[in-house]
Amino acid sequence: MAIAGKSGKLAIGASTVVDVSSWSLELGADTLDVTALGDDWKKFIAGLKEWSASAEGFYSVHTDATGQKALQDAYLNSTEVSLNLYVNAVNYYAGSAYISGLSVEDPVDDTVSISFEFQGTGPLTYN
């Protein structure tokens, strides 16, 4: 069954980050080549896993002290955040991350936008 994206949200711990219009999550895993001489086919084993995420929305750093401002402060101070990426009102991905990128766009003919890039550190869980 499909889920409408309108119920999703981004949170730092229990604090919702306001004015986020979208987020995305990327999961990855290394595969290690264990092919030996004489093998006709390559063989692999699972290696380390990693995750990263991004979010974008309308600029609200000046009014969202526990959300966008907290993310900006975490970026400026190189501190870890507890990130929750909600796909609906109940289910979410959770993990610790560093803000690896922050971008503000201020076009003359549109609203000011902000985007964040997150690098996960440690495991990601699904609740």
Image (cartoon, rainbow, N blue to C red):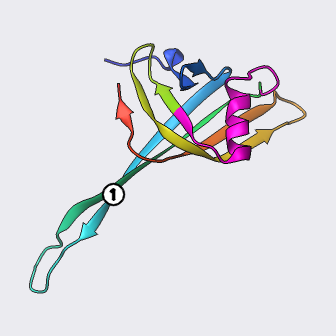
Mark 1 nearby-residue class (10 Å; few <14, some 14–19, many ≥20)? few
Give the vertical position of 36 relative to 44 (above or below): below
Give the vertical position of 26 relative to 83 (above or below): below
Whole-percent x, y for residue 122 in the image: 42, 46
Whether 30 is among the magenta residues is: no
Whole-percent x, y for residue 54 in the image: 57, 40
Give the vertical position of 84 relative to 29 (above or below): above
Residue labelled with disc 1: 48
Who's the residue at 53% across and 16% down the image? Answer: 6
Whole-percent x, y for residue 70 in the image: 69, 31
* Range of residues picked out in magenta: 61-82
Quadrant location, the N terminus: top left
Who's the residue at 27% across and 68% down the image? Answer: 32
Give the vertical position of 98 relative to 69 (above or below): below
Could you tell me the amino acid type at mark 1?
Leu
Q: On the image, which quarter does residue 66 sit in?
A: top right
Whether 71 is among the magenta residues is: yes
